[in-house]
Amino acid sequence: MKKYVFNIITASVLLPGLLITGCNKLLDIKDPVNSITTNQVFQTDDQAAIALNGLYSYLISGGEDETTSYGLLGSDLYSAGGITLAAAHSADELYHPSLAGDYQYYVETTARLTLQNLGYSYKIWKSAYKGIFNANALIEGVKSATSKDFTQAYRKRVLGEALAVRAMGYFYLVNLFENVPLALSIDYNDTKDLPSAKPAAIYQQIINDLEEASGYLSENYDGNNVERIRINKWYVEAMLARVYLFTQNYEKAYQHANEVISRTDLFQLEDLNHVFTISSREVIFQLKQINITVLRGNATPEGFAMTGRYLTPTLLNAFETGDNRKTAWTSAVVSNPYTPAGFSPAKYKINSTNFTFNGYRSEYYVVMRLAEMYLIRAEANMLRSAANKNAVIDDLNTIRERAGLNGLPYTLTDQQVTDAIAHERRIELFAEWGHRWLDLKRTNKATEVLSGITYKQPWNQHQLLYPIPPPEILWDNNLSQNIGYN
């Protein structure tokens, strides 16, 4: 695996307790060259807080490799829109009506990824591993620090949040690339020749990290639970629910989702137009974007990058008549000599047409929200036992009624309930963190659905995994390329 030599960069991000301005070398790789001198970083809580803020800053704002002179683009980071954009085009959510070869996501849309044209998969790989490197640096820093001025309470907080960030990175890597190196250290000697790890080993590490993090983190949010821009116990619980669903441990998936849903003092479903705002009580975790880039001002990176993206006809036709999600979460693209008519995702209302430089940020980038927990609880409950069918329907109806739809009857067959779960996940979570792409793959429906799409022909099943970037294999001969890419 490539040795990444870089610093965690902070850029004008206001997080609880600190205003960081400019670019600071928070984790400086100098002495020795193969490790960070953690005893110089974590002498006090304040020093650790700066590094922790840098961890979040990278996820939403990137570093020197991801930013342009105009600022961050939503496609540049896996954690700031890159997953959504790439995976939605790989699935059946986004496309361009012209299907021209110069379209930005042409190879993802048409299932033509090659080793010569990696599309945006390399950016996902690089930024995910950089985020993991940053998390590893904090984890090692906490465990190595000996200063009495670095308090036990803050040690737990830094460690818990860093473990959760590392788990998030590996979750997307294993689902998009499958066999990936499992780097748990910042020491080049430990990581330079790592082999491709099996998905089971990656998932076990994800679970271990999340379970450990759960014991360190608070159940509350900073700032009276309004701006939910730091990871706490409930994000970890929600992520565990998702991971256990993906690993087919339905009992634990149900339990963790139910734990989050039961905290009605913290979480509730919001009006559709309020779901993605900064004060939304549906939010479990969100990232706070910087507000000084000339390119996108107060828009989230994904909200900005979604402007002009087209929803596929198959997705638009999947909305039931009267579903308010189609009205609230999509916007019409008006036809002109340069732009065909259609509909774009509009979950984020601030985009490239209405952003304001240094303007008020009314919405942050939502990483996890309550609606997914209802859908996980419903699916896991049905897979635990079909005898739970009525409770499953109740959960689905909670989501449907928020969208203005009639509730489903208890007379549905088991298969109809299973189909309804898939439908509600598709509509509720469309163009959001790659949910549709990952759902098609984990339920073994991907080939059935995608092989019938004209512009993805000839369909090749190996496109369900993104290629391991060839430069990574050159740097580490122990890595294996995904089958079908040669």
Image: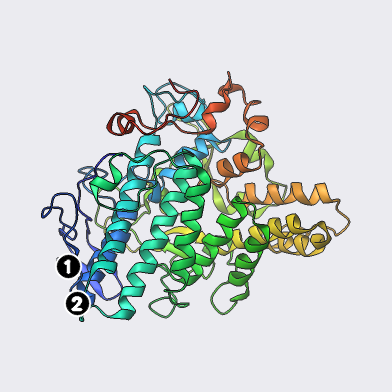
Q: Quadrant of residue 286?
A: bottom left
From the top left corner, tell me how far across and down residue 484 is, in percent: 50, 23
Task: Determine whether 114 is above or below 360 in the image.
Answer: above
Front one among 158 and 343: 158
Task: Determine whether 52 is above or below 6 in the image.
Answer: below
Q: Are marks 1 and 2 in contact (CB under 8 Å)?
A: yes
Question: With 75 as the anchor, is 33 left or right in this view?
Answer: left
Cα separation between marks 1 and 2: 8 Å
Q: Residue at x 33, y 45 (%)?
A: 127
Q: Which of the image's four quarters has the N terminus?
A: top left
From the top left corner, tell me how far across and down residue 8 is, in percent: 23, 56
Question: With 245 as the anchor, is 415 left or right in this view?
Answer: right
Front one among 211 and 369: 211
* N-term mark: 1 or 2: 1
Task: State whether residue 363 appears in this view.
Answer: no
Q: Which residue is mark 2?
A: 147
Q: Amino acid at mark 1?
A: Asn
From the top left corner, tell me how far across and down residue 239 is, in percent: 52, 60
Q: Which residue is mark 1?
A: 39
Q: Residue at x 41, y 71 (%)?
A: 227
Question: With 192 as the anchor, is 229 left or right in this view?
Answer: right
Q: Amino acid at mark 2?
A: Ser
Q: Residue at x 63, y 61 (%)?
A: 253
**Number of marks in the image?**
2
At label 2, counting other C-alpha atoms closer than 10 Å, the crowd grade (few under 14, some 14-19, many 20 or more) is few
From the top left corner, tell me how far across and down residue 462 is, in percent: 54, 27
Q: Tell me the element at label 2.
A: loop
